[in-house]
Every structure is written in C-alpha cells, then in structure tokens.
Amino acid sequence: MSWYYPKGWTDQEDGIEQVLIHYACTPPGQWPDWSWGHDTRILQDFGGYPRRRLKVLRMPREVWDMQNGWPTPEYRFHYYFEVYQHGNRWTTDLFSEDIVYRDLEYADDNGWVTHICIYWAVGDWTAPVYSPMEDPRIPADSEFAAKNYYAYNDKERFHHEKYHLLYGLDLPHRFRSRIWGPRGATLVQQYHVGRMYPPQEKSETWLGPNGPSAPGGDNGWVHHL
Amino acid sequence: MGASPVTAPQAPVFGLRKTWIDPGPGIAMVQAHYTWSAVGAEPDWTEAEQVVLAPRGGPLRTAVFEVPRTVGGETSFALHHFFFVVTANDRTASPVFTEDIASSEVTYEDQAGVYTSIGVVWSAVEDVPELAVPNYTSTVMDGLSFDTMGDAPDEGSLYEFVRAQPLPHVFRGRVWGVRGTRIRYGYHLIRSGQPDPADNVESWDDNERAGWIAEL
C-alpha cells in the first residue's frame, strides 16, 4: 500500500506549455542517481489565472536501503520540475525533503470499536489516505487482521470473528497505525471508526476533535511533522 | 548527484482514471482497491493499492490509479479492482473487475532529420475531456542502441548520434490503457544539443487539438 502526496505548481509567467515533475526516493542522507532510473509525471493542468497544475504522487511506505540491506520507513524525496515554455525547456533547482512518519494510537476504553482506520491527508483533503489500525495483540498473520478486511469475501463472517477476537482482549483496546509526510508539513487527520457487529448495532462515522462528522472538512486534527 | 544507486528503480507507471456513479444519496465514501497480475493469474490483495475517489459534483466520483507499465517484463497484464462503499450504516464491496492492460506502439517519422528526440503525450479518451490524465513516454529512435521503457526525455545530448543515422528517422514509443479502449496522443518534438544553442527548440504537435487515436 502507498500514501499520496499532492505536488502543485502555479505558473508565474505566461507561455508555459507543460510542467513535468521528476522524482526519486532514497534512504536518509543519500542522493539519487538520476541515470539509474526515476519517475517522471506530467502535472495536470487545472487552468485558472494564474494557471494551476497538480499531480498526486503515489509514495512508498518504505524504501529499500541496498547499502544496509533493510527497508526504511523514513526516507528522502528528491524532485525537480521541468518546464516547457515559449518553445524551450528549463528546470528548477533540485529539492529534497525528509519523509518522516508518526505513529498514532486510538484507545478504545469500552470496546465499542470493531473496525478503525486513520483517515488522513498531506496538506488539505486533496488526496486522502486510509491506514487500517490494529491492536498489536491481534497476530499479524491473523486471517482477521485489519489489512485483510477489504478483500475478504464474507464480510459478515469477518465482522463476527473480529468482534470476538477483540472481545477476548482486555480493555482498553489500543489501535495503532502510521501516517507519513514531509518534515515540516501539515497533515489533517480523522479516525474512521465502526462497530460492525452485532448486526443490529452496526454504525460507523468519522471522528474529529469535535466529535462525529462527515469525512474531511474542518473537523480534523492537524499534525505538524 | 553521482552517488551509487541505493534503491531499486521502480517500474514506470501511468495514470488511469476510474469513475464511480453514486446509485443514490447517503454514500459517505468510496474507495477503490487495485492490484495487478500476469494475464490469467489470480490477484494477490495483500499488497494492493487503495485510493479514495474524490467527489466531482453530483453523483460522480473519480480517482487515478497508478498502474505499472510492465508486470513481469510484459507490457500486457491484468489490472484488478473493486470498490468499497461506505454508507451511514453499512459497507459493501463491489465485485472484482478484471481488465486487460494493453499497449500499442506509436511512431513518428522525421523525414528531414529535424528532431533529436520525440516524446508522446497521451491519455485515455474520456467522455469529459477534463478528466483525461496526461502521461508521457519517451520514444526510441531506430538505429540507436538506447532502449528504455522510461517516461522522460533523455537529459543527454543525442544530437551527434541522431544525425549519424540515415533518414528518415523513425521514433517508436508506447501508450498503455485498458484493452478495447482508445488513447489520444500527441507528439513532443525536441531538437537539442545543437552546436548553436539558439537552434535548440521544442514544440508540441497535438494535431490541432484533436490528437491522434490509438485503438488498444
């Protein structure tokens, strides 16, 4: 699974025909070898004056560190823009950002929650992400681990089994998961909580600091990474 | 910038928009889950991608899938996705949709040897043109030993290599999409590395906004 990072551009001059973003990720403290492969995407033109362009990039949750032989959830994101303007091209400076994570915990004191995700986004709600949360006492290889939920064919069975798995654990249930973003950036965040069993008690909502609400909007926690 | 590589390069991707129409009021959120496999293989959902579809006004929601251009070295493969729909009191998953991803070769013939490299800008033909997702492919010229599935113009100067080749110069690239759909494309025409930098030029040819069409 990935998370999403919107990168925007606003034309500062006339005559810009196309803007591309070139980007690569490396472990902390390292630099990309651009000749060895990187990604390039065209920013979508949203028009307006000044003209706005945007590309939502799919970002990895970890980067493989070949020098050390392990994956790292914190890494560096390197990028520059290539601009085609008035029949010529020019490039911006190279920018590098530290991608860092924060682990969140939701404590359910009364056992109401059977399913929970972090609902979050970098910046505003342009590109929201779901991070399924799990109480670490649920075995990672459990058939009923949260990450297996979406593709599980018999949802009612999953609801029943997960309810009973959680019911057997002492309270509070402490659900955990992770969010990512560039250091110094602002993230907005809610919890999507649900009680999916027993059937007559099915209910779910998005929680923000002001209580239940619709997804997104102003009712979200704000994190500064 | 010349450090040794520290991460394995990812396969280039392309953007593919998917849409959803709310069948009625009361839908709070729609996610799409997607993954890919070799043609005929079952999907493995353990590392599937997910994306939230953004409301686009009225009942329409859309999201852009980031799909690799090759799977197992093949440019044809299967893309699997399903929608996960949350309403106030329930949640449902759609059936899994499996589509064949196909590619088509696109060529540009430069009779006069004007250009040093050619790019192809392309997107799936959408009913609403504003929903088109632009993608880019750099082409490979016949006779040159460079081979790339990359999606960006080469930074290096190709001028001397290109002009040593006999005319016409034929540039070949690929476009991708769901088999049976149409791709609209145009050309990015680049002349770089000239002895006099003032002769360097780039332009875009979109066939007077109509583009050209490839059937997948």
Image (cartoon, coloured by chain):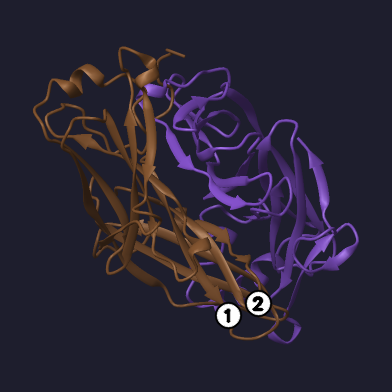
Chain colours: A purple, B brown
Residue mark closest to the camera, 2 vs 1: 2
Q: What kind of residue is marked 1?
A: Glu
Describe the element under mark 2 as helix, strand or loop. loop
Q: Residue B91 falls in which quadrant of the image?
A: bottom right
- Which chain is mark 2 on? B
Q: Nearer the viewer, residue B44 or B71?
A: B71
Q: Residue B179 falls in which quadrant of the image?
A: bottom left
Describe the element under mark 1 as helix, strand or loop. helix
- Relative placement, left or right, of A151 versus B199 is right
- Relative placement, left or right, of B149 versus A15 is left
Q: Residues within 10 Å of mark 1 (few under 14, many from 20)?
A: some
Q: Residues within 10 Å of mark 2 (few under 14, many from 20)?
A: few
The x, y position of residue A77, in whole percent, is: 57, 30
Check the picture and name the quadrant holding the C terminus of chain B. bottom left
The x, y position of residue B33, in whole percent, is: 50, 63
- Which chain is mark 1 on? A
The x, y position of residue A143, in whole percent, is: 51, 63
Check disc 2 and report the residue beneath it: B58
